[in-house]
Amino acid sequence: MQKKGTLFEIPLTENWNGHTIEDILKKEWQAPKKLVHELRMNKSIQVNGQLLDWKIPLKKGDILQIDLFKPEAYGITPLYSELDVLFEDEHLLVVNKPAGIDTHPNGPDDSETLAHYVAFHLQSQGEQSRVMHVHRLDRDTSGAVLFAKHALSKAILDRLLLERKIKRTYSAIIHGRLKQKKGTIHEPIGRDRHHSTRRRVSPSGQEAITHYTVIKDDYLKKPLTLVEVQLDTGRTHQIRVHFSYIGHPLVGDLLYGGKSLFPRQALHAKRLTFIHPFTNEKIVCEARCVDELPI
């Protein structure tokens, strides 16, 4: 597999022998109907340099050529900042977000976010692709964030996230000591009707599943606990809401009952694990915490 100009070239292996273009898009990659329609209408897929009927069986050794890398507007103004890149290829990018900035703009006045930095990073490499985050982190949470570089990559990564195949692992410092060394918080989360920015556990909310493992009690010789957390779902403020709900809010999380022992909430997305949508390689990205948070 390689990028040639705007084309992504895939030599077909034995596994795809007899498959059609339609099979590959709809069954192998499970691309959304709208994207499949766009690729068809734009005549974006060739085989061995020729346009073929999408229902013709392909054979081992054929070269599938998809026009994935056409120049596209960033959708945001590039802004320079040092960027800690954890993984990058022509399809996706994983970066280590510092605390204190949003992942993407939440309104027209947001002019300095991680997305702005990513746009500059792409621009500096001569790449013109829309900045597309696959998931996000809260403003005061640091750590690994995944971006897609083209529409097909975004569609596949979105599906993997929905299917819980992108594993996100966090470190957090919470108040108090947990009774169990391992546990799962499985409580639905919805909006708080009395506070516009808060979320709360609510029977009418969306399913939310948080797994945790105690790493160290009496952390920093205080009544605190260092925990490792994995999410099966990605609700807004999920970790913060769940630990507050069980009576152990995150240290520094004033919105959900934490005390201000550190300059920010004690939450860091330390690891991102997933299977690459095209190479099937297992990608493990480790993000170090770069500020003064002892995590």
Image (cartoon, grey):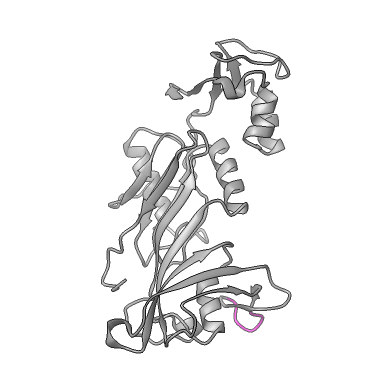
Q: Is residue 284 magenta?
A: no
Residue 104 appears left or right of 226? right
- Residue drawn where x is 64% and y is 73% of the image: 189
Q: Main secondary structure of the magenta part?
A: loop
- Residue drawn where x is 46% and y is 66% of the image: 138
In the rendered image, residue 245, in percent from the top left (x then y), is placed at: 56, 83
Q: Is residue 147 above or below residue 21?
A: below
Foreground of the two, 24 or 145: 24
* Residue 124 occupies quadrant: top left
- The range drawn in magenta is 192-196
In the rendered image, residue 65, in percent from the top left (x then y), is placed at: 54, 19
Q: Is residue 113 visible?
A: no
In the rendered image, residue 276, in percent from the top left (x then y), is placed at: 48, 40
Residue 31 appears left or right of 247? right
In the rendered image, residue 184, in percent from the top left (x then y), is placed at: 56, 73
Q: Is residue 250 above or below residue 209?
A: below
Foreground of the two, 245 or 134: 245
Foreground of the two, 52 or 80: 52
* Residue 98 occupies quadrant: bottom left
Foreground of the two, 131 or 242: 242
Residue 30 appears left or right of 85? right
